[in-house]
Image (spheres, rainbow, N blue to C red):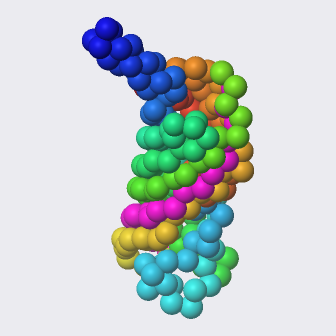
Amino acid sequence: MFFGLLAGLSLLSQNVEKSYQHHDILIGYGAFPIDQFLSVESNMLNSSLPDKRYVRDHYSGSGVITLTYRRISRSGFFMWGVTAGYNQSSASVYHVGQLVGELDRNFITAVVELEYRYVNSGIVQVYSGAGLGYQFGNEKLKPTVESGLSEVSGSINRLAYQANVIGVRIGKTFGGFAELGFGYKGIVNVGLSVQLY
């Protein structure tokens, strides 16, 4: 009887452990990253154009590719984890109205995130959250011949953040998600998610 009781408790504890998903792994793609909206100013550009009368135009970028791991709380309401991201961009730089070169930038981002899931009804999950971390960037200015400038490289290291106004995940173990927010992931972030025990 004692062994039967132990076996029953063991099975019960396994069922409790498997009654919720512990882990969420996501791969995402974000459009309109924050670099697109921030000032183009940097130490490298200030050294080449010390009067700071330059602007960026014709911006194009890869968007942001992210890989995220989240741990899901036993209650199912909170998720916390880490995200790594990569994006690159190109733009034309003008100084007092004249084209002086092409600016290439790439960024690697590492962030800690916290999400609150306020709807968790089977295949539909709705959540909001925020992330804070650091962004490591490199940039290179490829000048035009007419500008008289030399090719220069530099680095841009800064705080990274993301505010997710709303995120929706549809699916059980395998699912798709879409997030609307602002920050290093972009304004719109979509992708695939796998939730595991």
**Which quarter of the figure is the N terminus placed in?**
top left
Q: Which residue is drawn at 27% across and 12% down?
A: 3
The location of residue 111, given as percent across then percent down, is 46, 56
Q: In which quarter of the image is residue 56?
A: bottom right
Q: So how many labels did they put on this image?
A: 0
Q: Nearer the viewer, residue 26 or 16?
A: 16
The location of residue 126, given as percent across then percent down, is: 70, 36
Using the image, determine if residue 144 lies above or below residue 130: below
Give the residue at the far front of this rendering: 1
Q: In the rendered view, would you say 148 is above or below 163?
A: below
Say if residue 148 shows up in the picture. no
Query: Does residue 43 appear left or right of residue 190 in this picture?
Result: left
Which region is colored magenta? 124-146
**Viewed as shown, does residue 14 lie left or right of 75?**
left
Residue 47: x, y in percent? 44, 85
Residue lying farthest bottom?
Answer: 51
The image quarter containing residue 121 is: top right
Give the percent coordinates (x, y) of residue 118. 70, 40
Question: Would residue 117 be counted in the magenta stretch?
Answer: no
Position of 110 with respect to 128 (left or right) is left
Most common secondary structure along the magenta stretch: strand
In the displayed structure, 121 sits above or below 127; it is above
Residue beneath the point at 35% across and 14% down: 5
For residue 74, say whether it is visible: yes
Nearer to me, 50 or 42: 42
In the displayed structure, 157 sits above or below 68; it is below
Left or right: residue 48 versus residue 78 is left
Quarter of the image that includes the C terminus: top left
Q: Is residue 145 magenta?
A: yes
Kindly identify the residue that appears in the image at 54 percent across and 44 percent down. 79
Residue at point 47%, 24% (across, down): 16
